[in-house]
Structures are given as structure tokens and as C-alpha cells.
Amino acid sequence: MAKLNKIWLPALTIAVVIAAAGCGSGGKASTQNNAAPQQQQQQLQEQKQQQASDSQGVEQPVAPEKNPPGDIPDSQVFVNYSPASGLYKIDVPEGWARMAAGDNATFMDKLDGVSIEISKAAGPITAQSVEKDQVPALKKAEHAVEVQSVSSVKLPGGPAVLVVYTSNSLPDPVTDKQVRLENNRYYYYQKGQLAVLNLYAPQGADNVDQWKRISESFRWQ
């Protein structure tokens, strides 16, 4: 009997060692398999958080007013304006607040505005060059810009490029409210000079005739 005990004891020890090794190996594989889905879930969560952060950083268009103010009256009187340099002349609404700096000028009445900016240009412009060079800069400079069209137009003062777009106004300093604006932006070129005329008002306001008069009145001098 003692001989049998001596024979079975090593065999039993080996069986226990193998079983233990098998259990240990199986436990490790199970841990790895569970870790993979957890890692994937964490990555998906991080991606969602990044997407949410990116979307919060992009300003969204505000809803247009249902009954927008901003119609320029048909009885509005216009006066001719020219900077001290005499570089150009243009008709603007009489009585609007004016801010001028050199050849640049802005005329405002509540949420309506007319602005003229002068800069240097390397050569004549086209609808294609404005869409390539000017529109990206416009989208960076203004708020939630959505461009409707870019086209070449013939005006009494010469050829021009018209960009029609909507944008958000600056937040009201008191209420922080923004208004959706519609814009007609004209680019006039002459002899290395670029004039940018921007006409804006709350989206839905009726200023077709008044804006037509202003844009057609621009002349280089």
C-alpha cells in the first residue's frame, strides 16, 4: 500500500499543477477579451465628446425675425457722399449715423447699414477670384455666414461682383440678442484699388429699390 501511495502522489501533484496552469491561462484570456470592448467604448465616448466640443465652437445661424424691422421708407431722402480724398462718390440715406476713417465710411440706422471699404488690389477681379479669395475671408470675419450667390454684374459705374449672403448680427450689448441679416456685397475695381460696398438689413426686410439706387450710384472719381 505504501508503494501505491508513492506512485500516485507525484501523478496527483502533476495533475494539480496542470489544472492550475489551465485555470490561470483561461482567466488571463478572459481578462483580455473583456478589456477590448471597454477600450473601444472609451474611444467612442472620447470621439463623441470631441464632436460635441467642435459643434459648440461653430456659431449657428439664428432664426430670422417673423416681422423684421429695417425697411427703408420709400420717402427716404438720399445725399451724395464723397471722402476727403475724392476717391469715389455714392448716394447714402440722409440722417443715418456716420463713421468715417480715411476713405472708409459706415452709415447706420438701427439694424440697417451701408459700409464702404477701400483696399489695394493686384489686378481686376472676377466672380471666380472673389469666390476663391474674398468669400473665405468673409466667412472668417463675420458671423455664421451662408453665401447664396456670387455673380458678375454690370452697373452704371462699371462692372462689379455681387455676393449675396446672410449672417448673424453682433450680439446686442444689453440683451445679447442677435438678428439674422441679409447682405448684398459689391466689389468694384479700378487701377489697383478695390472698393467693397456692403448693404445689410434684417433678413426679410424690403429694401430692393433702395439698395439698387445705392449700388448704382457708386462712381470712382
Image (cartoon, rainbow, N blue to C red):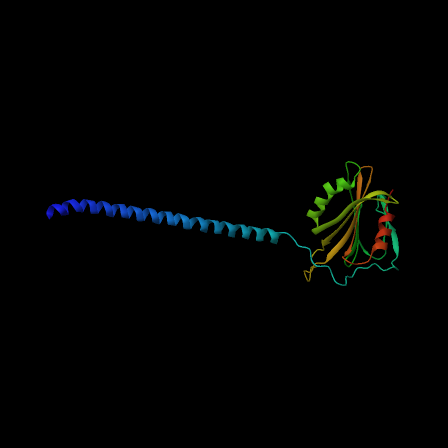
Q: Quadrant of the C terminus?
A: top right
Residue at (79, 41) in percent of width and height:
194
Number of dots carrying numbers: 0
In the rendering, at what x and y percent does residue 192 appear?
Answer: 80, 37
Q: Which image quarter: residue 196?
A: top right
Q: Nearer the viewer, residue 129 or 92?
A: 129
In the rendering, at what x and y percent does residue 51 appear?
Answer: 57, 51
Residue at (84, 49) in percent of width and height:
215
Residue at (54, 52) in percent of width and height:
48
In the rendering, at what x and y percent does residue 108 appear?
Answer: 79, 55
**In the image, is 147 to the left or to the right of 75?**
left
In the rendering, at what x and y percent does residue 129 appear?
Answer: 75, 39
Q: Nearer the viewer, residue 208 or 216?
A: 208
Q: Nearer the viewer, residue 205 or 79?
A: 205
Whether residue 64 is situated above or below residue 5 in the rendered picture: below
**In the image, is 82 to the left or to the right of 165?**
right
**In the image, is 31 to the left or to the right of 153?**
left
